[in-house]
Image (tube, rainbow, N blue to C red):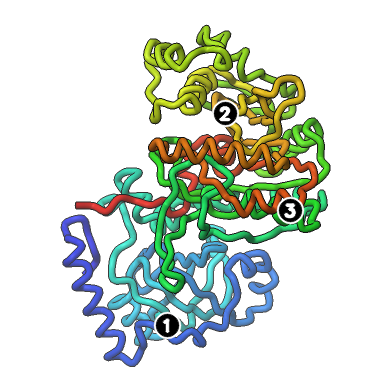
Amino acid sequence: MPEDASQTLEEIRAERLKKRELLEERGMLAYQPHTSYQGDAIATFLDNFEALEKGQDEVTIAGRVMAIREHGGSVFFDVFDGTGQLQAYLKRDMSEELFSLFKETVDRGDFLEVSGTFFTTKQGQQSVLVSEWSMLAKSLLPIPTAWFGLKDDDERHRKRYLDLLLREEARDFFKKKALFWETMRHFMWKRGFLEVDTPTLELTTGGAEARPFKTHHNDFDIDVYLRISVGELWQKRLVAAGFPRTFEIGRVYRNEGSSPEHLQEFTNMEFYAAYMNFDDGKKLIRELYITLAEKVFGTTKFERKGFTFDLAGEWRDIDYVSTVKKMTGVDVLEASDEELQATLKELGVSYEGANRERMTDSLWKYCRKQIGGPAFLVNHPQIVAPLSKVHTDDPRLTFTTQPIIAGSEMGRAHAELNDPIDQRKRFMKQQKLLEAGDEEAMMPDWDFVEMLEYGMPPTFGFGCGERFFSLLAGVTIREAQLFPLMKPRP
């Protein structure tokens, strides 16, 4: 009995379970052992179709049945293996037993192994004339159709495996994301960077300001944290150890809110380069972004979030303090805490933590949304950059920069602080913020300070990643993840 729109999922599943039993009654396993399949990828066969059709050698393909079309004494069905799709043609007169078993037991969604010879139909369709078939894996639930569709984004994300199966553009999107990371990796390799792996479980979450995830290490009986940066303080230790250029691509975890640009788990890249000066570092970042855009998207020109920008164009410098003053009327270096608070209230900007660091950062973020870029934000106040070198022109500022594109921060770079006395003082300030209840303040890492006392060369560091990809792709960062974390349904 063919499945139709009137049947419930429970009814369909019950019927398919009966078909599974029927297969086994007829001597065919519903789930074949892994040694059964001896064929090649469908894409390989399609590339060599004419020669194989001419030679009439028997071939074997395998894949999921995506469609079934019955025509009296014959059946056409499409087989998809992830590399390509091929039409198969099964005739009753080839084998009455196999033909009947197919009609009685095979459904859209099943995985089959099919053997036969290639031919081209009168309509010009490349096909395989089936001589043998066997079930590799019986599906018990139907692939979505017009009546069992993925009705919204929530459903697509929860059942991403079906979304990817049914939408070629979705599969192509994630291939493009893989190319993004491959391009970034090769970019770093070609410039002498060593790829490294650093801990994802830490005693202190150095390298960024964010609320961490906390867990317990049973063997040591200690609490540890999931990292919030891609090994910043660890990579700096490697630079001090004599590795002049390192990078890492890895997962990062931040126990914070969600937005089109923020998730609690994502992938980033960070690199650290000894003896690279600040301006050369900015040039390298620009070159990286242009390379990623050209190789992955085939262009450097984009229109996103109401902004039009060209990554291959000029990247101007934007001064942190003067930009905030121009847009809000407040000098964040000179204004009192009360003035900062009043300005934020007047602008309608919400923020967490009534301390100077949070208020300064919140004012900048209000301004940032109005800047299309591409540009480099420079001269960050020391209070919002606890790991950056003090600026030579003004000790209240730092050698920090961020690419600003389409109103968003698309990375962060520092001339890394390597003065252990200064670093200790800044960690102590962060410790006071933590003690005052600021959950996003940076945890001090006193072992890192000790490393700095042994000495670390002048170093330029930078991090970027998934947010930049999602911007260029024109989707939210959630949509850019294969399996975003979903809140359980009630």
Residue 151 visible to the viewer = yes
How far apart are the alpha carbons under marks 1 and 2?
A: 67 Å
Amino acid residing under circle 1? Ser
Left/right placement of residue 437 relative to residue 132 reads left
Check residue 59 in the rendering and tell me which mark sits there, or answer none: none
User: What residue is shown with label 1?
Assistant: 134
Q: Position of residue 341 (x, y in %)?
A: 41, 16
User: What residue is shown with label 3?
Assistant: 246
How far apart are the alpha carbons under marks 3 and 2?
A: 27 Å
Residue displayed at 55% across by 28% down: 408
How far apart are the alpha carbons under marks 1 and 3?
A: 51 Å
User: What residue is shown with label 2?
Assistant: 383
Q: Position of residue 421 (x, y in %)?
A: 68, 40
First in sequence: mark 1 vs mark 3? 1
Q: Are marks 3 and 2 in contact (CB under 8 Å)?
A: no
Mark 1 or 2, closer to the camera: 2
Q: Position of residue 459 (x, y in %)?
A: 76, 43
Quarter of the image with the N terminus is bottom left
Q: Are marks 1 and 2 in contact (CB under 8 Å)?
A: no
Residue 375 visible to the viewer = no
Amino acid residing under circle 3? Thr
Q: Position of residue 402 (x, y in %)?
A: 64, 31
Instruction: Determine whether the residue tagged by mark 2 lies in a helix, strand or loop.
Output: helix
Mark 1 or 3, closer to the camera: 3
Counting other residues with Cα less than 10 Å from the Cα at mark 3, is it few (<14), some (14-19), or many (20 or more)? many
First in sequence: mark 1 vs mark 2? 1
First in sequence: mark 3 vs mark 2? 3
Residue 159 image-quadrant placement: bottom left
Residue displayed at 69% across by 59% down: 196
